[in-house]
Amino acid sequence: MQREGAPERAQREEPAAARSRGHSFGVTSAQQSLSTVRERVVDTAVLRTRSLLQVGSKVAQELKNPLAAVKSLLQLEAEAIAAGHDGEGSRLDAE
C-alpha cells in the first residue's frame, strides 16, 4: 500500500532530479565548449609563434649578411695597417 504523501513526494523529487541532470549536462557542455575554445586559442598561438620565428630568422639573415661584409672589410683594413700600409692603395673605389 502507498502512503498518501509518497506519490506527491516522488513527483516533487523527479523534476528536481531532472533539473540536476540537465544542469550537469549544461556544465559538461560548457566545459567542452571552453576546452574547444582553449584548443583553438592554443593552435592559433602556435601558428603565430611559428610565423614570428620564420620572420625573425629572415630578419637575422638579412642583418647578418651586411654585417659579415663590414666585418671582413674591417679585418682587411686592420691587417693592412698592421703590415704598415695605410690601406689606401689596396681598396677599390666603388665610384
Image: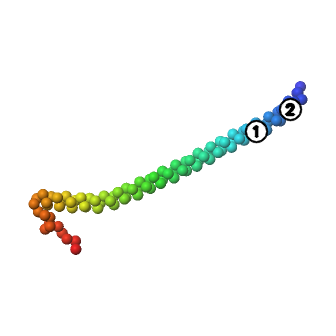
Left or right placement of residue 8 versus residue 82 in this view: right
Give the image location of residue 55, x and y in percent: 40, 58
Q: Quadrant of residue 82?
A: bottom left
Give the image location of residue 74, x and y in percent: 21, 60
Q: In which quarter of the image is the C terminus?
A: bottom left
| Residue positioned 87% across, 30% down in the render | 5
Q: Residue furthest left?
A: 84
Q: Do the residues labelled 2 and 1 touch (CB within 8 Å)?
A: no
Q: Which residue lies furthest to the top in this view?
A: 1
Q: Nearer the viewer, residue 27 or 89?
A: 89
| Residue positioned 72% across, 41% down in the render | 22
Kindly state the secondary structure of the residue where label 1 is placed: helix
Within-10-Å neighbours for mark 1: few <14, some 14–19, many 20+: few
Residue to which mark 1 is pinned: 18
Q: Which colour scheme is used?
A: rainbow
Residue to which mark 2 is pinned: 7
Left or right placement of residue 30 versus residue 49 in this view: right
Left or right placement of residue 20 versus residue 53 in this view: right
Q: Quadrant of residue 12?
A: top right
Q: In which quarter of the image is the N terminus?
A: top right
User: Disc 2 and disc 1: Cα gap in Å?
Assistant: 17 Å
The circle on residue 75 is: none
Give the image location of residue 54, x and y in percent: 41, 56
Q: What residue type is labelled 1?
A: Ala
Q: In which quarter of the image is residue 6?
A: top right
| Residue positioned 24% across, 58% down in the render | 71
Give the image location of residue 70, x and y in percent: 25, 61
